[in-house]
Image (cartoon, rainbow, N blue to C red):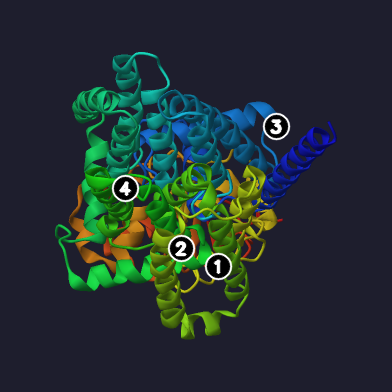
């Protein structure tokens, strides 16, 4: 009786500790502002929508499926709290997204439990859910992160129903969304189908067939009814690559470095290979070789979007982090003898990351190469060690210890002040609030319903909130045409230019100096601006730098200047 009471007490304490660790990390995560790319998308949708432009016609550098998701979250926010401060907007959209993640993870749990049992379901669903919620700020709600979320749902949808054919029919449309939110993330859909195949081959066959049909239908329908989506896609690809991306040694080296840099921010990437080895070692004979091939292919596919886009931003590895966390959770659940080494290594690597991410920028840039090599070397060493330790009987740990260890591993990138990357692009951008009070006030002075023409990045639109009737609320093509002359020959550039030459509703031109350099823009752009707006120092409306506000010609000076 006494031992039973002690066991129940220990389980209760463990559950409470695990819940507190997870909730505390989630609370810290929620303090981070939505990243600039997400606020860019929201700003474009909000301001063009207020100007009467249909969501089907708004350009935001993202495909239609992603635009619809972001518009749904933003409309939900408006209905819940209305037009509120930026901090409230960030929090409400995060909470809405967390609700979606919880629903997706519930489906994943039910699916994995049906085909692989409860322990696997708890480990995989729990770890995957934590990785999606406690995502690095630069990952959260990016299309690459949304693709990972959709892939997780596809796995759950394929496995949850009793009948394999029904699971396949449900998984197909969801796997199609992995492709629809961003074409470069299509390898993530292949990972989902691969995982389904590991769990149940019949369901994978049905899911693959359904996915092929759904992707074909999506392609045909968007080509027929949304041809501009494909024009934009081709022109966006041309921004990054003037010719198709091939296999180049230099790009492979960039990928290797970027993966190591991402591992400093997300230590779970260092533990992912070890977890995979532990899982593979459960199989015997030919099955072990097959499992090893699946693990290698899945890992490679998770890196393919980063390589294909050729920019190697940290958020391109969003699916890799989620995949590594899922493998971590599966290994912790299914290899009890490996729990202590896995948790200990996780805590050790995470502690090192916490120290490294607090180093000043010059130090991080100077020591980036040896740090990356050290992290990649550690990943290899831990994977080798896992091959020897995974099957041995050592002191096990309760599942609550796994929640604590994984929550700790996901903590480094979400702490206030942590950089968006260790030493690659955006290494100097840190987590924090979005101080846009002056921009909000500027929008109010111009008049909340006064239409303007933005030559700004979409985060400025999001802060100001003034409507625009231009379908390019953030004029990417005109802006990129300044530094990339070939952009001026693309259809999107000519269409974007019409906002300057044909749109006559705007009362002010809002320019973000530095981002849009008018003196360096094309002659036709400068001529259209000079014809419509007065940007002389005497005529400008007072605005916080680097913003310049030019009234339409004929407007009395000082109408909004205060």
**Is tag 3's residue or tag 2's residue first in the polypeptide sequence?**
3
Q: How crowded is mark 3: few (under 14 residues within 10 Å), some or many (20 or more)?
A: few
Q: Is mark 3 on a helix, strand or loop?
A: helix
Q: Is mark 4 on a helix, strand or loop?
A: helix
Name the residue at the right extreme: 2
Q: Could you tell me how far apart the alpha carbons at marks 2 and 4 are, in whole angstroms?
A: 44 Å
- Res 233 seen here: yes
| Pair 3/4: label in front | 3
**Residue name at image x 48 percent, y 42 percent:** 334
User: On the image, numbered disc 4 is attached to which residue?
Assistant: 496
User: On the image, numbered disc 1 is attached to which residue?
Assistant: 349
User: On the image, numbered disc 2 is attached to which residue?
Assistant: 270
Residue 154, percent across and down? 38, 30
Q: Could you tell me how far apart the alpha carbons at marks 2 and 1 are, in whole angstroms?
A: 8 Å
> Contact, CB < 8 Å: mark 2 with mark 1?
yes
**Is tag 3's residue or tag 1's residue first in the polypeptide sequence?**
3
Q: Along the line of sight, which residue is nearer the eye, 285 or 200?
A: 285
Q: Is mark 1 on a helix, strand or loop?
A: helix
> Contact, CB < 8 Å: mark 2 with mark 4?
no
């Amino acid at each position: 009786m006494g031992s039973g009471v002690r066991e129940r007490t220990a389980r209760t304490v463990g559950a409470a500790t695990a819940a507190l660790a997870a909730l505390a990390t989630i609370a810290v995560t929620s303090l981070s502002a939505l990243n600039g790319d997400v606020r860019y998308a929201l700003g474009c949708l909000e301001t063009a929508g207020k100007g009467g432009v249909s969501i089907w016609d708004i350009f935001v550098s993202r495909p239609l499926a992603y635009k619809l998701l972001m518009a749904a979250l933003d409309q939900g926010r408006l209905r819940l709290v209305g037009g509120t401060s930026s901090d409230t907007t960030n929090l409400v959209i995060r909470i809405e997204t967390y609700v979606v993640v919880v629903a997706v993870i519930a489906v994943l749990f039910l699916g994995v439990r049906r085909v692989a049992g409860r322990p696997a379901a708890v480990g995989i669903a729990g770890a995957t859910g934590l990785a999606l919620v406690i995502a690095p700020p630069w990952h959260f709600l990016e299309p690459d992160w949304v693709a990972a979320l959709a892939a997780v749902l596809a796995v759950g949808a394929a496995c949850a129903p009793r009948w394999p054919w029904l699971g396949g029919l449900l998984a197909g449309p969801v796997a199609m969304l992995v492709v629809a939110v961003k074409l470069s993330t299509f390898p993530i859909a292949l990972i989902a189908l691969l995982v389904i195949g590991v769990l149940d081959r019949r369901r994978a066959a049905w899911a693959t067939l359904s996915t092929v049909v759904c992707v074909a239908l999506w392609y045909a329908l968007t080509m027929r009814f949304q041809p501009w989506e494909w024009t934009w896609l081709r022109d966006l690809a041309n921004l990054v690559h003037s010719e198709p991306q091939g296999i180049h040694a230099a790009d492979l080296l960039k990928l290797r470095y970027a993966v190591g840099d991402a591992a400093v921010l997300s230590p779970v990437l260092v533990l992912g290979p070890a977890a995979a080895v532990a899982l593979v070692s459960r199989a015997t004979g030919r099955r072990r070789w097959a499992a090893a091939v699946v693990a290698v292919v899945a890992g490679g596919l998770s890196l393919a979007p980063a390589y294909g886009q050729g920019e190697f931003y940290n958020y391109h590895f969003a699916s890799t982090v989620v995949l590594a966390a899922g493998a971590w959770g599966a290994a912790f659940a299914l290899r009890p003898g490996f729990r202590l080494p896995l948790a200990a290594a996780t805590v050790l690597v995470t502690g090192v990351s916490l120290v490294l991410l607090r180093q000043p920028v010059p130090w991080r840039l100077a020591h980036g190469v040896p740090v990356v090599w050290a992290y990649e070397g550690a990943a290899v060493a831990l994977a080798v060690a896992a091959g020897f330790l995974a099957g041995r009987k050592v002191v096990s740990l309760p599942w609550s210890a796994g929640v604590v260890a994984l929550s700790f591993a996901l903590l480094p990138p979400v702490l206030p002040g942590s950089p968006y990357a260790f030493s690659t692009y955006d290494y100097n951008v840190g987590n924090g609030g979005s101080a846009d009070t002056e921009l909000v006030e500027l929008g109010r002075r111009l008049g909340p319903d006064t239409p303007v023409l933005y030559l700004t990045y979409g985060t400025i639109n999001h802060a100001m909130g003034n409507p625009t009737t231009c379908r390019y609320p953030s004029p990417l093509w005109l802006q990129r045409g300044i530094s990339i002359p070939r952009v001026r020959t693309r259809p999107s550039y000519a269409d974007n230019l019409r906002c300057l030459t044909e749109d006559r509703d705007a009362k002010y031109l809002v320019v973000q100096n530095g981002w849009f350099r008018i003196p360096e823009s094309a002659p036709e752009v400068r001529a259209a601006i000079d014809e419509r707006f007065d940007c002389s120092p005497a005529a400008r409306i007072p605005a916080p730098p680097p913003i310049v506000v030019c009234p339409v010609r004929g407007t009395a000076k000082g109408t909004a200047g205060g």
